[in-house]
Image (tube, helix red, strand yellow):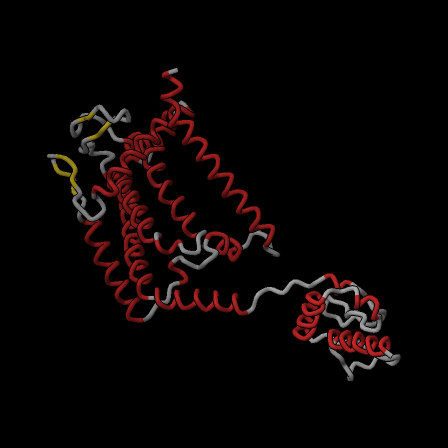
Amino acid sequence: MFNFIARIPDIFAACCLIFIFLNIAYSLWNARAASPDGFTGRMLAEWIDPYKQTTFYFRYTKAGILVLLFTLIFAEYHYLTMPKITPEGYTTPSIFLNLLTYLPNYLIHEFSHRFTWTITQNEFLTVLAGNAGETFVPLICCYYLLKLKGGRFLLPVARFWLATTLFDAGTYMSDARACKMALTSSDMMTNHAPGAAKGDWYHIFNSLGLLEYDQVFSTVFCALAVVILIIAFYSLWHFFAYLGEWQKEDSSCAVKEKNEPEIIMPEVWHGSIPGNNHGNGYTAMNTDSSADSAELSDPAMEQARKIQRIQGIGVDIGSGGNTDTWEDPYEKWKRQQEQEGKDNSL
């Protein structure tokens, strides 16, 4: 019983992963089926970002591009030269390391170790799953926010979160050979002093024969983290800068839909007159048959008249099929009823 209760978090995480992967696969399959050309770059772009909320669709100005470039250069220089391995340990005070992101990143990192070991019993995958799971969670959040029309509200936060996980991985990589970081075991109870235990990336790089390139991989991940950090702040500014325009666009679309409601064709248009199909997908109503017209209720005739005026459908009258003398079918029906009433009174 206690073993089952202890496995509940693992079972819940497994169910979440299965749902996420099946949902992504189903969405991708539908996007491929809807695309006339199959898998293309445009199809993938529309599938990932259907509402154009990524930085590729931002409105850039020359001044904005210059500010972005100078900010990116300064941030890259600052964060790539800051990490230092000292005899006392490994310290990286920065905007990335804060309580709002450290705690969830730490919990996800350690839980990913435990979850992967429970599922696979593979030591290499278990070690790799720490930073992989830590990065996977905010990445999935970004994916689902892009699928929401109002996802731009929370995308800056998700991007900042993603940047912190990449920076954590980069700083962890740089300590692969030095082993100067104070570490915690996956049981989240056992602490190791600096140098007392080897980190995850020592085991990963050593097993792949890439231990001497730890600083190279660290630089790449830290640089990518800085880029995403700048994008997060720029997207936050971009959101507030164009919030008014987006609200106007949304309100204009809502007003347009309200003023132009969808018109549903009534069954009256499914009747047929030989040789009177006007090529627009609907067949004109037979106005020469007063008996058929009389069977229609007034609301149906009113709807038919409105649709006929909007669509511009002509009705052939007379033997020659002349459409120049067009008469509203509803008015004609009323005139016929009035005429029949007068004849009966006589």
Q: Residue at x 42, y 25 (%)?
A: 119
Q: Position of residue 91 (x, y in %)?
A: 16, 40
Q: Quadrant of the C terminus?
A: bottom right
Q: Position of residue 307 (x, y in %)?
A: 67, 70
Q: Residue at x 79, y 68 (%)?
A: 293
Q: Horizontal placement of 67 versus 125: left or right?
A: left
Classify residue 321 by image quadrant: bottom right
Q: Quadrant of the N terminus?
A: top left
Q: Nearer the viewer, residue 96 or 302?
A: 302
Classify residue 334 by image quadrant: bottom right
Q: Position of residue 165 (x, y in %)?
A: 30, 42
Q: Residue at x 39, y 25 (%)?
A: 8
Q: Position of residue 163 (x, y in %)?
A: 30, 48
In the picture as drawn, the residue positioned furthest to the front comes out as 345
Q: Horizontal placement of 112 versus 196: left or right?
A: right
Q: Horizontal placement of 263 versus 252: left or right?
A: right
Residue 216 visible from this viewpoint: no
Q: Nearer the viewer, residue 261 or 125?
A: 261
Q: Residue at x 27, y 35 (%)?
A: 106
Residue 202 visible from this viewpoint: yes
